[in-house]
Image (spheres, rainbow, N blue to C red):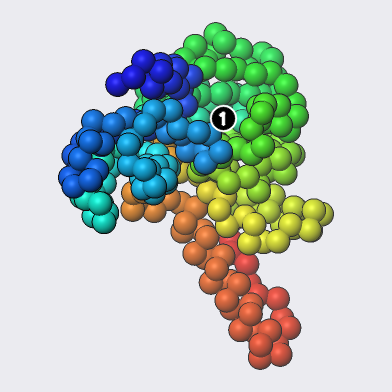
């Protein structure tokens, strides 16, 4: 491997960037000389790869497939039957660690930050109360920020236009208004996970308030995981943290275990369907709402 290729790979790993090392492991026919070629590639199309695969016009195809592997956070062995010869490529993926942002530094945030760090998440905790958001309460967190919720979330973007598919957001604030501030800031970002703690009644009150006062469509809340976590009968703060972490891991690994929010979402979809059916029949009575 060329020195500049190795240096680019090491630099990206040290910066905790998502990166892939693409290696031509075998090649035949007119492409036989490309065997052993290396290139470092990043998920951003506009960022030029470093290194040389030696595959000529086919390099762009291989690099595009390598970017897909990085997006899927998994190593890939790729095989191609080009006119000039068969080629096998291995993409070794160094995925950027998922970033958990916990809004609210109360009793659930403490075990959640610790468990998430154990699971190799980068962890940021924020709260508007300096007596809660400080390093001694969260020794394992990468960043602890004291400040108003919405401006602090906006400040965490720092050079990134949106929170992205490696971002996990957990809202465990102490009240409706803080939940609303956080949701207004992040609701439309393409994050991997957005969860909000609270009872069905509290969650419904927040969503309805935002629909009414901010004209946000009800469908915008479908990706919010609320109530948060997997239903394991959790009671203590540590147990609740476990059920939240389980749901985040399930999302990250494309697991099949349904969270509590999916049960609630299913009920919301059924209510909408009933409402649409009622409207279609010309019956304008309000549909019944769920209890609690």
Q: Residue 160 versus residue 278: which sits nearer the camera?
A: 160
Q: Quick check: 19 above or below 60?
A: above
Q: Quick check: 17 above or below 91?
A: above
Q: Residue 266 versus residue 186: which sits nearer the camera?
A: 186
Which residue: 55% across, 53% down?
Answer: 223
Which residue: 78% across, 58% down?
Answer: 215
**Which residue is identified by label 1?**
102
Q: Secondary structure at mark 1?
A: strand
Q: Quadrant of the C terminus?
A: bottom right
- Residue 92 placement (x, y as % from top left): 30, 33
Q: In the orientation shown, which residue stands out farthest toward the front?
A: 30
Q: Quick check: 39 above or below 76?
A: above
Left or right, residue 140 beside residue 152: left
Q: In the orientation shown, which residue stands out farthest toward the bottom?
A: 281
Dividing the picture into quadrants, the one containing residue 5 is top left
Which residue: 51% across, 58% down?
Answer: 264
- Residue 174 placement (x, y as % from top left): 65, 32
Residue 166 seen from this side: no
Q: Quick check: 90 above or below 146?
A: below
Number of numbered labels in the structure image: 1
Left or right, residue 262 beside residue 34: right
Which residue: 69% across, 15% down?
Answer: 130
Residue 86 seen from this side: yes
Q: Residue 193 versus residue 23: which sits nearer the camera?
A: 23
Q: In the orientation shown, which residue stands out farthest toward the right?
A: 213
- Residue 250 placement (x, y as % from top left): 37, 44
- Residue 91 placement (x, y as % from top left): 30, 37
Q: Quadrant of the N terminus?
A: top left
Q: Which class describes the residues within 10 Å of circle 1: few (<14), some (14-19), or many (20+)?
A: many
Dividing the picture into quadrants, the one containing residue 218 is bottom right
Q: Residue 120 versus residue 108: which sits nearer the camera?
A: 120
């Amino acid at each position: 491997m060329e020195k500049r290729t190795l240096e680019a790979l090491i630099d990206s790993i040290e910066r905790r960037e998502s990166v892939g090392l693409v290696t031509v492991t075998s090649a035949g026919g007119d492409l036989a000389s490309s065997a052993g070629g290396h290139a470092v590639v990043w998920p951003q199309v506009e960022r030029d790869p470093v290194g040389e695969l030696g595959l000529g016009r086919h390099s762009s195809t291989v690099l595009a497939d390598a970017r897909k592997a990085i997006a899927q956070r998994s190593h890939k062995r790729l095989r191609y039957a080009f006119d000039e010869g068969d080629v096998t490529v291995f993409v070794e993926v160094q995925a950027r660690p998922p970033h958990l942002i916990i809004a609210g530094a109360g009793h659930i945030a403490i075990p959640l930050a610790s468990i998430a760090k154990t699971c190799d998440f980068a962890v940021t905790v924020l709260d508007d109360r300096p007596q809660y958001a400080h390093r001694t309460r969260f020794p394992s967190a990468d960043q602890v920020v004291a400040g108003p919720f919405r401006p602090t979330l906006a400040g965490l973007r720092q050079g990134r236009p949106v929170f992205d598919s490696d971002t996990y957001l957990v809202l465990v604030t102490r009240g409706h208004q803080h939940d609303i501030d956080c949701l207004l800031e992040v609701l439309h970002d393409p994050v991997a996970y957005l969860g909000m703690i609270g009872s069905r009644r509290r969650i419904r009150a927040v969503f309805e308030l935002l629909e009414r006062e901010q004209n946000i469509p009800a469908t915008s809340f479908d990706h919010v995981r609320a109530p948060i976590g997997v239903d394991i009968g959790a009671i203590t703060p540590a147990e609740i943290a476990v059920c939240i972490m389980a749901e985040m891991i399930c999302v990250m690994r494309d697991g099949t275990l349904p969270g509590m929010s999916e049960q609630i979402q299913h009920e919301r979809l059924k209510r909408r369907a009933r409402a649409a059916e009622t409207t279609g029949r010309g019956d304008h009575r309000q549909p019944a709402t769920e209890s609690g």
